[in-house]
Amino acid sequence: MQPDSSRVASPSDADTTPARLWSLQAWRLAFPASLVSRLGDFVFDITVVLWISTEIAPDRSWTPIAVSGVLIAAALPVLFVGPLAGAYTDRFDRRRVLLWSNAVQAVTIGSLLLIPLCGNTIGVGGQLVWIYLGVMVTNAAGQFFMTSRSVMIAATIPENLRNSAFAQQGAANQTLAIIGPPLAAPLMFTAGVGWALAIDAVSFLVCTWLLARVRWDSAPDPGTAQLGLSESIREGARVVLGTPVLLAIGSAIVIAMIGAAALNVLEVFFVTDALDQPASMLGVLSMFYAVGMVLGSLVAPRLARRWAPGPLIAIGLIVSGVELLAYSRCTALAPALLLYGLIGAPIGLVNVLIGPLWMKTVAPAMLGRTLAWLNAVSTAANLVSMAAAGWLVSTVLHGLDLSLAGMRFRPVDSVFSAAGMLFVVGGLVTFPILNRERSPH
């Protein structure tokens, strides 16, 4: 792919883009708001898992099922509330939706502070139900927050600065992914679950306070506001299905989620079986992957100034697929660490470029609904892939051990190889469509 000279930015433009981004009041408020909220989420996610497994239902035969119930409670609102949230966001004042949804999350997390006080009265079952409901309500409100925040970004960040905005946000999120979880566990065990929950609730309040100071045109499109709720939801689906670029982006995300889900479910077994390392090395691998994602996120805007983002997304899938294929053949720790970090780099690039390209392609009046559908489909793909990966390794591929072309194939590494091939095929299929996109620069 040759760079289009009409899309090449000057070095001075590249150097001043971050500065121009930080000159926007909306970004100066939205960026720290997202960091605070994200850090609170990391604390909450680790806290709930440890709370259930060590205090509410420790050493029970069904403890793993109780913990997995948290994941189910978190995923269901994305599937069933997401499209509704997108339609609602596009039909009402987006700023109010943004602030109220964040406030609902703060109140819901705060309500979990009452569980230790009522534990003896409601029993283990009551405590678990309360937690599951809290997670469901929080994630349902999060769907409204996510769609309205995306609309806010599209309304307050100029198109030529969005890649830089997503890059900085993505790099910051991955940095928090490295330092957040190790801080959450000691916080709970030293300060107690109440403090951990309180920090998360306060993080939502701080986020709400910061975002309330952002002023933007949040009124819905008059025509959209007059649509019925069901018609509004269907219109969002029609736009996604009827727009080739959106279908290609959606396919790219689904493919990435399928591969990521397989890695998440089976990675610990790859570490212990293929690499012959203790399970604790999974944390080191995850750190290398996060570092790779940070680097990929930071370099994405500079690449997007020279080449169109669409084909870069497809190429990112292909590169990550080839790297995943190589990673699946690893039997030693050192090359595995290097390749795992390299896999993260193109994934970080893809994550940065998808959001701005989606916002460029979709009319502002349709942004909430189409993003909600995209999120719901990608979550469904993630859940199906996690279940399929575990099922394949446990049944169809169980006991697999064969040599081919000097390489040994066993259940887990075979699934990783298949995921890598899926990445490559997905990139090749979506490239012709995404290559039609032209950068605004």
Image: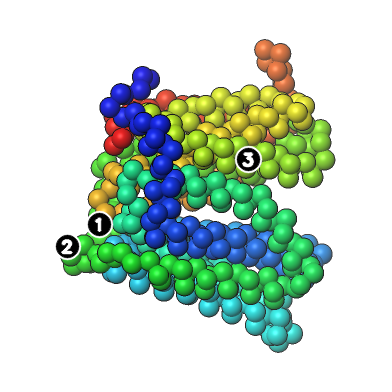
Tags 1 and 2 touching, CB below 8 Å: yes
**Mark 1 and mark 2: span between their CA atoms?**
9 Å
From the viewer's side, name the closer residue of 343 and 125.
343
Give the alpha-carbon distance from disc 3 to disc 1, as whole Å.
36 Å
The structure residue drawn at horizontal position 79% and vertical position 37%, both measured from the top left corner, is 272
Q: Residue at x 51, y 60 (%)?
A: 32
Residue 282 figure quarter: top right
Disc ID at residue 223: 2
Q: Is residue 84 visible?
A: no
Residue 191 visible to the viewer = yes
Residue 37: x and y in percent read 54, 63
Give the x, y percent position of residue 51.
72, 68
- Residue 103 drawn above or below residue 369: below
Colour scheme: rainbow
Per the image, the residue denoted by label 3 is 291
Looking at numbered disc 2 in the image, what kind of residue is underneath it? Answer: Gly
